Image: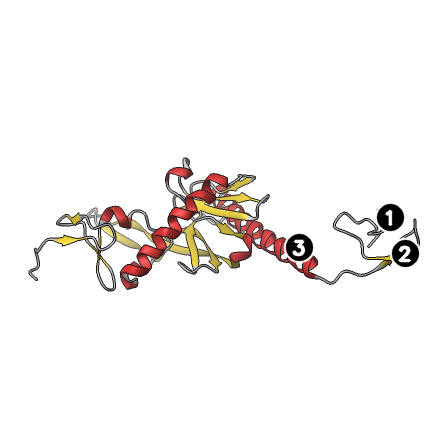
Amino acid sequence: MGLFDKKFCDVCGQKIGLLGNRKLEDGNLCKDCAALLSPWMTDRRHQTVAEIKEHLAYREENKKKVEEFQVTSVIGDTMKVYLDETNGRFFVTTAVKYKDVNPDVLDFTQVTGCDMNIDEDKDEIMDRNEEGRSVSFNPPRYEYYYNFNITIHVNSPWFDEISFRVNNSRVEGRGSVEYHEAERETIEIREALTKVRADVREAAVRANAPKQSVTCPFCGASTIPDANGRCEYCGGAVNG
């Protein structure tokens, strides 16, 4: 086949325009189908056609989770972490109308870790000599700026992590208000996800723990309290 032979999408079957092809491991993908993929899936070129079709089916199912999502908390400025603490789920997106972009909804239990790091970079501050040319100070002077990044490690069949920059523009000055605000926001995201993950897992451990029998103070029977903490024989409230 020649370089400019017509190509067709192996997922939807549509003809692919001149600059619209997205290569897969064993086929081609049109830009419209590519736009439906999760933004956190970074190894698309190594995915097969069958895997992409499976992924797009997952993305279609994800729309139901987005519709059912009950926002209880939002953390962040530009890139936001939405929490549904009622159902133990979250997603990350920059979109205000998030339903339009179908953000990947994950369970708190899928979080395996959460890291933050601060990237420091610098620009040299230049002087001008008598000829008006830009020259270095002696010793050189620098202006430092920072970016706050967070990586949420997740257990998902489609991606291993969600990585993003918290600040929407570079932060100048370690002691600036912008620096402290970006740092606070980054820590808040990490602690929120770490806490909800721990709370969900602790609840699961308690739910699976073997129940202990107690003596009912009302009827004197040895009983294992039901889900409402009541005696299985007389219905009286017991501790246990």
Q: Earlier in the sequence, mark 3 or mark 1?
A: 3
CA separation in Å, label 3 and label 2: 28 Å
Q: Earlier in the sequence, mark 2 or mark 1?
A: 2
Of helix, strand and loop, which one carries label 1?
loop
Q: Quadrant of the C terminus?
A: bottom right
- The amino acid at mark 3 is Ala
Taking the view exactly as shown, the residue that stands out farthest to the front is 233
Read off the residue under disc 3.
Answer: 203
Q: Residue at x 38, y 49 (%)?
A: 59
Residue 138: image quadrant is: bottom left
Asked whether disc 2 touches disc 1, contact meaning CB atoms under 8 Å apart, the reply is yes
Q: Position of residue 82 (x, y in %)?
A: 50, 43
CA separation in Å, label 3 and label 1: 28 Å
Q: Position of residue 108 (x, y in %)?
A: 55, 53
Front-lying residue, 127 or 109: 109
Of helix, strand and loop, which one carries label 3?
helix
**Mark 3 neighbour density, 10 Å: few (under 14) some (14–19) many (20 or more):** few
- The amino acid at mark 2 is Ala
Read off the residue under disc 1.
Answer: 234
Q: Does the rendering let one see residue 157?
A: yes
Asked whether disc 3 touches disc 2, contact meaning CB atoms under 8 Å apart, the reply is no
Front-lying residue, 102 or 235: 235
Read off the residue under disc 2.
Answer: 221
Is residue 50 rendered to the left or right of residue 111? left
CA separation in Å, label 2 and label 1: 9 Å
Q: Earlier in the sequence, mark 3 or mark 2?
A: 3
Is residue 110 rendered to the left or right of residue 97? right
Front: mark 3 or 1: 1
Q: Residue at x 52, y 57 (%)?
A: 111
Of helix, strand and loop, which one carries label 2?
loop
